[in-house]
Amino acid sequence: MSRLLSSLVVAALAVAGLCPAGAAQEAGHVKVSRGTVQIERAGQKRPAEVGATVQAGDVVTTGSDGSVGITFLDNSLLSAGPNSVLAIDRFAFDSTTHQGAFESSLKQGTLAVVSGKLAKQSADAMKVKTPAAVLGVRGTEFLVRTGVPKE
Amino acid sequence: MTTFAIGVRGLTGLAALALLLLAGCARPARDDLYVLLPGPDGKTGAVSVESGGKATVLDQPYAAARIKEPGRVEAGAVTEAEARQAFGAALGAQPGRPVSFTLYFLEARDELTPESKQIVAAIPGEIAKRPAAEIVVIGHTDRVGTVPYNDALSLRRAERMRDELVKAGVPADRIRVEGRGEREPLVATPDEVPEPQNRRVEIDVR
């Protein structure tokens, strides 16, 4: 009986492993994390440690002492400086065809971007938004600062 | 006299209003800066900056756009030093660049060519440099043999490389293995043509 139960548990875990409950697909991983860095997912904030998974829908925030670097599955690199709020709005990447879409929003702060395979495959695949502008990326490296002027 | 007095007061009011407006101009609504960087290979791409329906394209190294009021994009340029100054922390947190290795195999075998054996020795060091490294090992074949035969051979080649990396100390759970068979040749050939460049394993490290 207990053997049956444990095999049931194992089976349930296996199924859970195959399709993580309601979780969006992983989009990338934190590779650099300095000072205060948090990932907000489904209303919950947790520290963004090196190795942490980043998904579509996540909002990554840095404190006044913080900076963070994320490598995405298509080899895009996004890194943010202090006092930044970066939302990963959408990420889809087919590793065989290199097609998909990557949209992110820098609500405030600074961001350095190295585009990856998505932008190389298609000129419209990668977009970075700020409260004031939409950037269309055509395979490149660039910097974004957005915010209101300091007093 | 009264009219004149009112006039003066009115003028003062106007002056005050003008000062307020000037102050408004002195402090813009936003302090946005967008800068295009040259690529590591010397090639510079392009970024379009669109605000309020108008788009500006940055396509030169250190070309920059400023937005102080939404809908107004001021095109210009910054120096490299200015870019480093404004974005130092963000640039400093940039993850290591992903690297890719291509290793070639002897015909119909999971044995590397002598040249590729030399390259494989450098890979564990590249992996060790990267925090939370992710490794994808993708096997390929040429078009000699059936599709199922080549699917199996490509996977065997990839698994062989995975085993080599694990032997060199790379944690197995960081490595993903794929076999793509003869579907993605580096050099296009008719079926059943031996092609050394297509007998390969790609190792992506990020």
Image (cartoon, coloured by chain):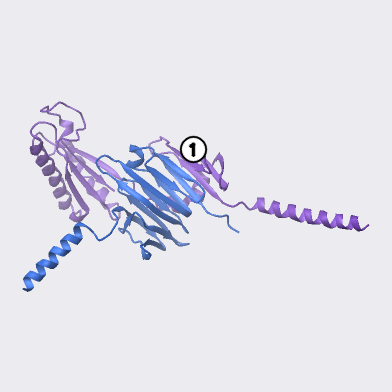
Chain colours: A blue, B purple
Which quadrant of the view contains residue A18? bottom left
Residue B103 as seen in the image, left or right of residue B5: left
Q: Which residue is mark 1?
A: B58
Residue at 15% of width from left, 26% of height from top?
B190
Quadrant where the N terminus of chain B sits is bottom right
Which quadrant of the view contains residue A36? bottom left
Give the residue type at disc 1. Answer: Leu
Q: Position of residue B49 (x, y in %)?
A: 49, 41
Q: Position of residue B82 (x, y in %)?
A: 53, 46
Q: Position of residue A39 (x, y in %)?
A: 37, 61
- Above/below status of B176 relative to A136: below
Residue at 40% of width from left, 58% of height from top?
A60
Which quadrant of the view contains residue B146? top left
Nearer to me, B150 or B77: B150
- Local crowd size for mark 1, using a 10 Å CA cut-off: few (<14), some (14–19), many (≥20): many
Residue B131 as seen in the image, left or right of residue B18: left
Q: Residue under mark 1: which chain is it in?
A: B
Nearer to me, B195 or B114: B195
Residue B110 in view here: no
- Above/below status of B73 relative to A85: above
- Indicate the secondary structure of the residue bearing disc 1: strand
Residue at 20% of width from left, 53% of height from top?
B170
Residue B203 in view here: yes
Q: Position of residue B31 (x, y in %)?
A: 56, 51
Instruction: Work out which residue is located at the far front of the displayed protein and give it.
Output: B3
Count of labels in the image: 1
Instruction: Work out which residue is located at the far right of the displayed protein and give it.
Output: B1
